[in-house]
Image (cartoon, grey):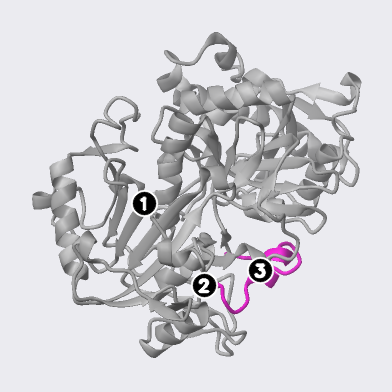
Amino acid sequence: MTKIKNKFYEPSLEHYGIYKSKIKYNLSVDELYNISISKKLGELTKNGVLVINTGKFTGRSPKDRYIVIDEITKTKVWWSNINIKIDPIHFDRLYKKMSNHLSNKELYVRDCSACSIEKYRLNIRVISELPWSDIFVNNMFNEINVNELKNFKEDWIILNAPSFLADPIKDKVKNKNFSIISFSKKTIIIGGTGYTGEIKKGVFSVLNFTLPVFKNVLPMHCSANTGIDNDTSIFFGLSGTGKTTLSTDDSRKLIGDDEHGWTPNNRIFNFEGGCYAKVLNISKENENEIWNAIKPGALLENVILDNDGFVDYSNESITQNTRVSYPIHHINNIMKPSCGSNLKNIFFLTADAFGILPPISKLNSSQSAYHFISGYTSKLAGTEEGINKPKPSFSACFGAPFLPLNPIEYAEMLINKMKKMKVNVWLINTGWSGGPYGIGKRINIKYTRAMIKYSINGKLEKLNKDNYNVHTIFKTQIPKICPNVPDKVLCPELTWNNKNDYHKSALILAKNFKDNFRKYINQAGKNILNGGPKSS
């Protein structure tokens, strides 16, 4: 319980249909650590960090995410296999079953908020079955001042019950697990999965609808940092492309690692109060800031400990999606508050497993829109069942599973803001060079950091036209030189043993881009379509 003005305050859950529960309200992380250990729900590393196993689900389940179709959503949501409709009557039935399930249980309740600018603040009450789910919420959202808690008024509530399973036939859902958003009820219900990322992505989906529709704010699946001259850079990218790693730089202040908004007056602000980083193969040498953030208070998910109690970060026996959440203040060099202005550079990160895209190239406005809508990266063998070789993967706006609106709407907002601010846009390949996965090698992160550094400080921007090549297929501008990067590395064609093989593979990748973009052709204007690659 939280002590407020010499009185103990405990919120009632009866108006949510939850009765006679033992409430653990806004407990400290130390208390939640102790409860998790005492209930044998986790174990401590040698360094005193809690490790838990999320169970059957070690990642999000985007095909089990639903949005209630109602007066608010029916004409605005981009209904698709990503935004799946569910009728209000089925939501209400599931909610009632879920609230009954949570009654008479020990529950962990936390009041918190999203968005670091007060004007856009979203107050959230999260009701969880498990103590380590509450640790995640504590780490990932903004803390409410103790003096505000007694009069706290939530804008949204989240019911999170991993042990509650739906009846697919009666409840009109595909599987026993689900995540459902009701904009009319301002409620998210999550059942049948212990994967904590469903909580944060549920809130992100809410903001991806409410901010552009009602506030004219562009929500972005990106990380952000700022330099000593108060110049801001943002990094878009899907999981595994280096978004968190590359934005965490001891020479720049971190604004946030995953979710941000771009306001009408051109401020960049963080939605969250923490970071959620992948830790597979993490090392102190390459990810020093993240490495040092994994300390007591953090939450490690689905990792394996060795016999001495240390994490074996190379072990993927549970999942490749091993994770850690920690409050942003575990990073030494952060921006306070978590906001930036004077946006200068946008980086689109992709892990191209085919070794085709240059490690860095400059995009014009048409190409920026095209690549933003495409949201390209690669899935590698072993990351999903049935994938035996690298596979192109496209996720609109680098975050399709969280976009309630048509991707074109977000892209148009982005392009308008970019033009107004005269922002430089760079496509960064953090994937393979010298051939595809299995033949070539992953691009050295030291080279990638150097390319980003010299993009930010203006050295690449100031190169004259003679110091750029134009990619023959993707038509992007490739710098011929970059300090601390071998010239050969900058031109992917030169890193392959056979130029004809490179050209053939580049055409295949270009065709994949074109095939993916067909669903947007009738809505994207000619200017956006001109940003695509050649197909022959």
Residue 523 at x, y = what percent?
44, 15
Region in magenta: 280-298
From the viewer's perspective, tell me whether residue 469 is left or right of residue 314: right
Q: Is residue 344 magenta?
A: no
Q: Quadrant of the C terminus?
A: top right
Residue, x 41% and y 52% (percent of image)? 384
In the displayed structure, would residue 111 be above or below residue 437?
below
For badge 3, the amino acid type reads His
Residue 21 lies in what quarter of the image?
Answer: bottom left
Observer-side mark, 2 or 1, equals: 1
Residue, x 56% and y 84% (percent of image)? 45
Q: What residue sits right under mark 1 in the picture?
A: 156
Q: How busy is the neighbourhood of tag 1: few (under 14 within 10 Å), some, or many (20 plus)?
A: some
Q: What residue sits right under mark 3 in the picture?
A: 330
Q: What residue sits right under mark 2 in the picture?
A: 299
For badge 1, the amino acid type reads Trp
From the viewer's perspective, tell me whether residue 219 is left or right of residue 58: right
Q: Quadrant of the N terminus?
A: bottom left
Q: Are marks 2 and 3 in contact (CB under 8 Å)?
A: no
Residue 151 lies in what quarter of the image?
Answer: bottom left
Q: Which mark is residue 25?
A: none
Give the mark nearest the N terminus, 2 or 1.
1
